[in-house]
Amino acid sequence: MVAEDSVVLVGGYGVVGTWLAQLLRERHPDLPLVIAGRRREPAEALARRLGNAEAAVLDVTAPDPLACLSGRPRAVVSLVNDPDDAVLRSAVRDGVAVLDITRWTSRVKSAVLRLSGTPPRAPVLLSSAWMAGLVPRLVAGASERVGGVERVDVGIRFALADQAGPDSVEYMDRLGMAFDITEGGKERQVLPLTDGRRVMFPDGRPTRVFRLDTPEQATLPLVLGARTVSTRLGFDSGTVTWMLAALQQVGLLRLLQHPRLTSVRRALMASSGTGGEAAWVADVEGPRGALRIEVVDPKGQAHLTAVGAVLGTERLLGWDGAPPPTAGVWFPEHDARPEQALAALRGCGVQVRFDEQPRREAA
């Protein structure tokens, strides 16, 4: 029987899930955890290692995935793709709080539309912006310093050798698809891997970065009123970055979207899994000035994503110094709790720096 105060980690024995489970155990030793997934063996092994945890076999494609739990948990953290919103619908139907970190922008929008007809009786935190919502969470903190957000430019450096689970490389499936961005308060469509820019990262290494579809480009204008938001990504291998940009330019990435070519697409992003550093920067401009946010995690993107999920879990449960959110749909930039977020990040070994910057001249 699942304890009523437990937190269920759907996909809890995956790459990010394992990091999250370990971080939650370190920060909250008395929190009962349920490690849930399709395979019992790895779930039981991790539960034994953590202590105060149990395993559950859960299929996200089942009509009512949470029915297998034989009890009503306190919250569910979705760490794997929920293609038919089955986990989301199951949790909302039972009045269970949900943190979801796995949705692309279009699926964030579809979840909001799905929930509009059946308002949830518990909070639903859609936190699938970059690194489980770290980008919009820290941008919201910066907005207080610059008097509101007018413009945000995010640059990400992805280490090809970094450890990554299958869900984290599925963005290769979207690199041929146009997406919406907001510029000057107006929406327009762009293609991924276009409009490259050179970004200097905290270690002094310049990296060419290109457009990428990420949810904060939709939510920051909605929640914080930002008039221009762009997110761009580059790889620590300039050769790979330019190869993908060239494939986009000649139209081959669109052709590679055929389902039969899935393995070919994902082979372009093959990782050795030996480890790499995660790094991103965000230039935030507002009426009172400009700031640069610099974030580096020597333990890599999976660990940094898990830290973002820890912040989301603590916000969902009201363990970050403020009451939990009320029933409804929320994003990370709502009540971001910047001081608590910075303390948690640094406590997890993540390097975070805020630097005042000169405002760019108007075009």
Image (cartoon, rainbow, N blue to C red):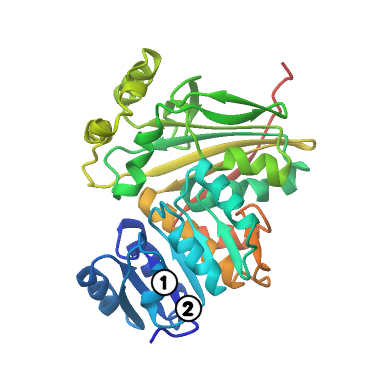
Residue at 24% x, 40% y: name it: 271
Residue placed under numbered mark 2 in the picture: 73
Residue 245 against residue 77 in the figure, above or below? above
Amino acid tagged 1: Leu
Q: Are marks 1 and 2 in contact (CB under 8 Å)?
A: yes
Q: Residue at x 28, y 34 (%)?
A: 259
Q: Secondary structure at mark 2?
A: loop
Q: Is residue 42 left or right of residue 327?
A: left
Residue found at x 50% / y 63%: 89
**Residue 289 falls in which quadrant of the image?**
top right
Q: Quadrant of residue 124?
A: bottom right
Q: Quadrant of the N terminus?
A: bottom left
User: Earlier along the polypeptide chain: callout 1 or callout 2?
Assistant: 1
Spot occupied by residue 175 in the image (x, y as percentages of width and height): 40, 29
User: How far across and down, in percent of the image, does residue 5 sit?
Assistant: 50, 82
Q: Which residue does the numbered mark 1 point to in the structure image?
A: 66
